[in-house]
Amino acid sequence: MSTYEPVIGLEVHVQLKTESKIFCACSTEFGREPNENTCPVCLGLPGSLPVLNERALELAIKVGLALNCQVSPRIKFDRKNYFYPDLPKAYQISQYDMPVSSKGYLMVVGAGFKPAPTPPHPSLSPSEGERAKVRGRRIGITRAHLEEDAGKLLHEGIKDGSWVDYNRAGVALLEIVSEPDLRSPEEAFQYLVSLKAILQYLGVSDCDMEKGSLRCDANVSVRTRGDAPFGTKVEIKNMNSFKAVQKALAYEIKRQSEALESGEKIIQETRLWNESKGETLSMRSKEYAHDYRYFPEPDLVPFSVTNTRIDEIKKSLPELPQVRLERFQKQYGLSEYDAYVLVSEKSLADYFEASASEKVSPKMLSNWIQSELLALLNLKKVLIQESPVKPKDLAELIRLIENNTISGKMAKDVLPEMFEGGKSAEAIVREKGLVQVTDTRLLEEIAERVIQANPKVADEVKSGKAQAIGFLVGQVMKETQGKANPRMINEILSKKLALSTRGKA
Ligand SMILES: [Zn+2]
């Protein structure tokens, strides 16, 4: 075990799904012409005044409540001063000492689970080896505060200088700051998955990292294991996926541990993650709060939210992932792991429930979604909510397996056709004559033939080597061109070889 222990805290910026910006009426629509969504307020023209978007505040409170935070009795905005061309006012309206909410926590759901076999959705970890060591750990949330986003600088393909697009300037952001409670890159990854799931369930953001509506910076230090004081922390920026956060943290922990090992000192600084090189590079020395000369925003007065309003918002909260996880186990008898995979992406859980309402085996359904359907969706790069195989269609396919019309093996060939051609399972089964052979007499005949033809294997089975029966089952399947029911063959063969229900019946 390494002598050094990492201490990690994450800052997540979430673009809130409001129609207009946080302090003006400009549209937040993505993909408009550069600078189309601007006005004197978000361009910082003299004499213009900000007005708080009430919807942004409501969404921020929702997130705070879902993260078990206290909504601050008094809410205030402050100016964070710094100069950068993407910030037309040369200050950002943010919150310094009276954020919307603070002192909450998040249960990291699913830490300790084996990740899904194939990445069913980009946020889930693909590799087997990445198991976090703890399960359902509680990670503190320091605060969640509102602020405005900055514009975007465009450098590519521009010969002389850079251009700036202020469409994003003034879009509502919620910055969610965790306590330095995370202890491994895997746990940081799981924290992000859990947080994103909550945000999606709340419907407060589209959480699209590619569009920049979810961004994450990480603070990481290492200390001698078991030591109380924290080491010097380094901030990492520029990670554009959860995987990248995990990789950057792993790199940085190794770098810091090696530096300490060789007697170097860690400098407090900001480092940029370079995805193609797989390393972090020093960007600048870290700023401190006093560098920003925070002061109260004079154009927005502090205010309070009434308890009645907070209660109203609390009542409007939907079922959250943690609760749904428990319900899935209870209501559908799913394993904790299966429930976790389904629940960690809202659209996946919704699909499952819509399909389960057709009264098919939830366990079987969960398996089919997690293996066959997600593999197809990944292959064709289709989101589950746009799946050509609708929840009802999948339930129909499973019903055909349940009532022995087709075998699971046949169904695996039927599903891709449903996916491609939009035909129903029943139609495909009928067209291809895929009906399962369930004629016992016929199967018994074939089984007898197979036993005669393979006396050695038959003897092995008789002498107690039960697993040898698999070969015989395979032979019967072959004779029936895969149309027999493997369970029936197994029973017939077992009975013939006097294996079957010995001691049971
Ligand atoms: Zn504006």
Image: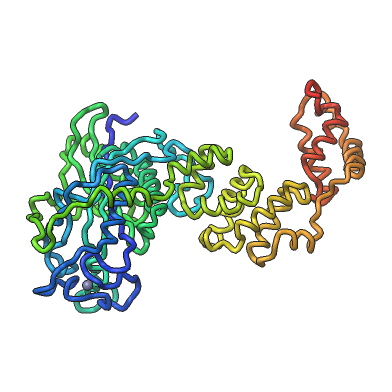
Check the image and report above or below for 497 versus 145: above
**Circle count:** 0
Can residue 274 be seen here? The reply is no
Work out whether residue 418 or residue 238 is closer to the camera in this orientation and state it. Answer: 418
Q: Residue at x 18, y 31 (%)?
A: 229
Q: Residue at x 39, y 46 (%)?
A: 194
The residue positioned farthest toward the front in the image shown: 308
Place residue 391 in its image quadrant: bottom right
Q: Residue at x 31, y 40 (%)?
A: 105
Can residue 69 be seen here? The reply is yes
Check the image and report above or below for 37 versus 53: below
Left or right, 268 with respect to 129, comes to: left
Work out whether residue 303 or residue 42 is closer to the camera in this orientation and state it. Answer: 303
Place residue 373 in its image quadrant: bottom right
Q: Residue at x 88, y 46 (%)?
A: 439
Check the image and report above or below for 161 versus 406: below
> Residue 349's x, y, as percent?
51, 50
Left or right, 383 with respect to 264, comes to: right
Q: Quadrant of the C terminus?
A: top right
Work out whether residue 458 or residue 99 is closer to the camera in this orientation and state it. Answer: 99
